[in-house]
Amino acid sequence: MASGDSKKSFQKALYLAIAFVIVLVVANSLIKIVSNPGNLLRPRMDGGNANLVELDTGETALIKKKISGFWHCDGVLSRQYPFLSVSDRFELKNNGIFWRVRRDVARLQSGDSVDFVTVMNGYMQPYYKSKTNPDSIMCQVHFIGLVMICGKDTCYAEHTRMSTDPKKSVIPDILRTKVEKGDVAADTVWDVFMNASSFFIEGRPYAAFDTAGSTLPSFFPKGSVKLIGKISVPECANTVSLESSVKQALLRDFAGLSVESRTQEGIAKTVDTYYRVMFVENLARRATSFRKGSFTLSFAVDKHGRVSDPKVLDAKPLNMRLNNDLKQEILTWVFPVCASQNSLVVATIPFVY
């Protein structure tokens, strides 16, 4: 072969190799985008809401002073989860430090219930206010200590030792640690609303606790706040949460229940009550970085209440990773037994998130 032909062959091989590498890089990027559209735009703390304006330092200090005090609610039905009621105790200090004991009670179909208690110590920083309603505030929340109690099991999810030096604040250390890890300097966000007559956190109404009487020492359940930082409390496994506690309770509860007939309407009612928001819509919001969308789920239920053949239909926008997560989630669902059922009953249910 002539040297010129050899050189041309080498150049062609080189160009093909470069083109192949470019195709691989582009394909890999497209897969990442399709599997998680949220990667196109990193979410802002305000969720991109044009109605929110950032607070200045003076406003932040005034708001923390305004909302300080002892606040409580008892047995308030959850707006998101129709089977859940919340009892809550808050001590908010004017420097942003808070203590909180929250008790969630999940009412099951059999009439039984399951309790999930969360004990928190942390720091709340007002961050945004609504342009149209300045009494509506969005707050960044940092946990110093967080203990969860489910049944007889008690464990900690967040554990930061308070400094023995009263002049040293733990808050700068928390903020610095979060930023160094590349995370947003907040563990969660709370929506707070307060005016002269009302106080709401996350949409729940709270009343001011009467601190003048002798009942203040019993404001928090006895011994609960002492669990924060207690050495004997073990660390929680990654699977411990209100959601996992509710899911396990549903499995046990439905296994002991039966229905006379199985219909798509009955399946949809159970989904709307127990599974829709906590296990489907929340999953979709997390997987898409809290963007909006819609899809339809289809699945079959047998006479034993077991689920099979999960499908995701009409998903907008398309998100392959979310579709896979949804199908895996559906397979964990259970329904009451139906002895009269002779064949699979297919349910098709739309969702918007």
Image: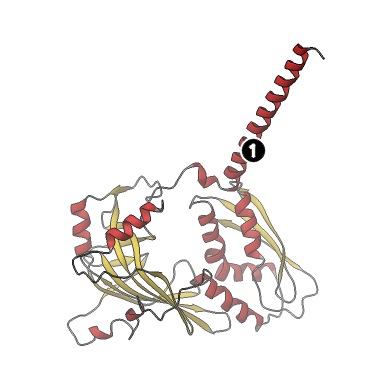
Helix, strand or loop for disc 1: helix
Q: Position of residue 318 (x, y in %)?
A: 61, 46
The amino acid type, in three-letter code, at marker 1 is Ala
- Which residue is pictured at 55% across the width and 79% down the height? 108
Q: Is 149 situated left or right of 318 in this image?
A: left
- Which residue is pictured at 75% across the width and 75% down the height? 303
- Among the 4 quarters of the image, the one containing residue 232: bottom left
Q: In this view, does 231 lie above or below 25?
A: below
Between residues 292 and 341, which one lies in front from this camera angle?
292
Q: In this view, does 353 lie above or below 37?
A: below
Whether residue 349 appears in this view of the structure is no
Q: Is residue 315 above or below residue 252?
A: above
Whether residue 165 appears in this view of the structure is yes
- Which residue is pictured at 68% across the width and 82% down the height? 258
Between residues 44 and 25, which one lies in front from this camera angle?
25
| Protein image colouring | secondary structure
Q: Position of residue 122 (x, y in %)?
A: 32, 67
Between residues 265 and 80, which one lies in front from this camera angle?
80
Q: Position of residue 22 (x, y in %)?
A: 63, 31
Question: Is the residue marked by circle 1 packed among few (<14), some (14-19), or many (20+) residues within 10 Å?
Answer: few
Q: Which residue is the extreme one toward the right?
A: 1
Q: Is 174 situated left or right of 251 in this image?
A: left
- Among the 4 quarters of the image, the one containing residue 266: bottom right
Q: Is 244 situated left or right of 120 in this image?
A: right
Q: Where is residue 169 in the image (x, y as percent from the top left)?
A: 24, 64
* Total residue callouts: 1
- Identify residue for label 1: 27
- Which residue is pictured at 34% across the width and 47% down the height? 51
